[in-house]
Image (spheres, rainbow, N blue to C red):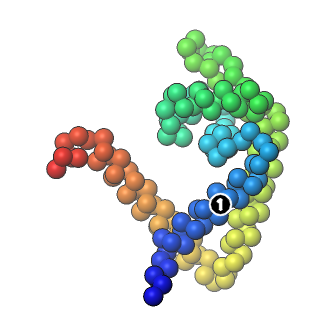
Amino acid sequence: MPAEITVLDRLLEISELFQKDMERAFDGTPLTAARTRLLWDLQHEGPSTQHALATRLGVSPRNITGLVDALEANGYVTRSPHPTDRRATIVSLAASARLLMQRMQREHAELSAELLGAVAPADRPAFERGVDAIAARLRELVAADEARRADPAEGSA
């Protein structure tokens, strides 16, 4: 007897489909999901230090350096000296990346509208509340797990 399809199964399927769509969209480019996430952050937050980027993206300083190096080598970002901190640099979107990110934002809005169009208009408010509640609860569970892992005394209990 086949197993029942759960909400988690559907959410995982959606995640995989988004991943495949992103891979298809960036096929033939040097962009990866991590690099695109950094560009998306710069588009929304503006020029930033690498430290601020690493913090917002939840990655190590070493990882952010590799991402910025690759994006700079491919002309997506530029580095400039920080105006008040000699040790820091500011990472900004290059002009070509700003155009790419504007197009990506348009496509993002179009896909969002297309997907939401699959839900009956009367059901949309409840659907959106449900998705928000699931995302909030998953963030809580992930944060609790991270806190538990970071506290050696808690891990041994």
For the question of whether residue 52 can be seen, the reply is no
- Would residue 147 be found to the left or right of residue 65 on screen? left
Please tell me whether mark 1 sits on a helix, a strand or a loop.
helix
Q: Residue at x 72, y 41 (%)?
A: 31
Q: Where on the picture, by quarter, is residue 66? A: top right
In the image, is 84 to the left or to the right of 140? right
Identify whether 107 is placed above or below 8.
above
Up-down relation of residue 143 to residue 14 (above or below): above
Residue shown at the point (54%, 68%) measured from the top left: 11
Instruction: Tell which of 79 and 84 is nearer to you.
Output: 79
Residue furthest to the front in view is: 1
Q: Which residue is drawn at the image coordinates 78% and 57% (left, top)?
A: 107
Which residue appears farthest toward the left when viewing the image?
A: 157
Where does residue 71 sit, x and y in percent of width and height?
Answer: 70, 32
29 up-or-down from 114: above or below: above
Q: In which quarter of the image is the N terminus?
A: bottom left
Residue 39 vs residue 17, the one in the foreground:
17
The residue under label 1 is: 18
Viewer-side residue, 25 vs 87: 25
Residue 91: name its quadrant.
top right
> How far from the left and from the top, in percent, is residue 78?
73, 25
Residue 15 makes an appearance in the image: yes
Instruction: In the displayed orientation, state which residue is furthest to the bottom.
Output: 1
- Residue appearing at x 55%, y 77% in the figure: 126
Identify which amino acid the numbered label 1 is placed on: Phe
Q: Where is residue 34 in the image (x, y as percent from the top left)?
A: 61, 42
**137 left or right, relative to 41:** left
Quarter-of-image position of residue 40 = top right
